[in-house]
Structure formats: structure tokens, C-alpha cells
Image (spheres, rainbow, N blue to C red):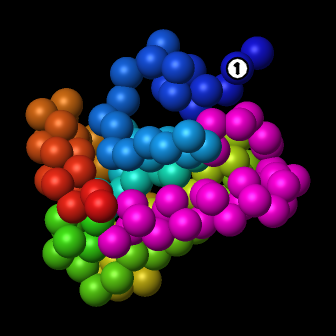
Amino acid sequence: MPSIFTKIINGEIPCHKIAEDDNNFAFLDVQPLVMGHVLCVTKLEVDYIFHHEDAQLQSLILFSKKVALAIEQAVPCKRIGISVIGLEVPHTHIHLVPLQHIDNINFGNPKLNPSHDELAEMAHNIRKYIL
């Protein structure tokens, strides 16, 4: 059975897409820790990040860098935090979270519940900076 991320990549579940290449896909987290929280996922459905071939892992990291630099331009922050947890969805993904302080990347914090319009505006603002 395909993961929720595969369904998003395939267009079966709507998302606020940020970027895509041949191997990877980035979209806004719909329940972000902070506004601008993006998930970068591999198109190849592999549960554990370290089970990817080296070339795919390198591709994901470089793709995430491109997305992180765009987020940094679109969202006022001190830097972009990166987290790989991999317990909640069995599909490799990297969280990119704009940080003002370390608590912004605490997954125990309550999640935000932005509106569709707020997410659409945020996605548009980040996409402007994708190179």
C-alpha cells in the first residue's frame, strides 16, 4: 500500500508543492511547527533514510539544500533547522523548519493549523526563491 507521501507525489492527495525534480518532492507540512515548515521526500518509497543508495541520499540532501535556501529567503528566521525522524510515516523525509530559537524544532510542541489560503500564500512566497 502506498504511503501518504507517495499519494501526495502522485497527486492523489492535494498539497502545497514547493519544488520537484526527478528524484525528490517538497511540500508544506499542513500542520507545521512554524510557518514555512517543509517536507522534502524521495519519490522512491523507502522507509529508512540510510537504506537509500548513496546517489539518492546525495540527491535528497542537495535538493533539501536548494529548498532550505529558498525558505530562508521567504521566511524571516535565523536559520533553517533540519530533522530526520522517520517514525511517523514509513517513507524517507526531511523536515526543514525555519528557526528563531531551538524550541521551533521541538516536535512535542503543539502544531499550527493554518488555513488553506495561508499555506497557499506561504508556498507561493517560498517558490519565488527556488533556483
Asked if the magenta segment contains residue 45, the reply would be: yes
| Residue 63 versus residue 4 in the image, above or below | below
Asked if the magenta segment contains residue 129, the reply would be: no
Residue at the image position 58 percent from the left and 32 percent from the top: 5
The N terminus lies in quadrant: top right
| Kind of residue at badge 1 | Pro
Residue 70, given in percent of the width and then of the height, sits at: 28, 65
Which quarter of the figure has residue 67? bottom left
Write down the region rendered in magenta.
42-69
Q: Is residue 43 left or right of residue 9?
A: right
The secondary element bearing badge 1 is classed as loop
Residue 10, given in percent of the width and then of the height, sits at: 52, 20
Residue 108, given in percent of the width and then of the height, sits at: 52, 62
The C terminus lies in quadrant: bottom left
Q: Identify the residue position indicated by label 1 in the image.
A: 2
| Residue 76 versus residue 32 in the image, above or below | below
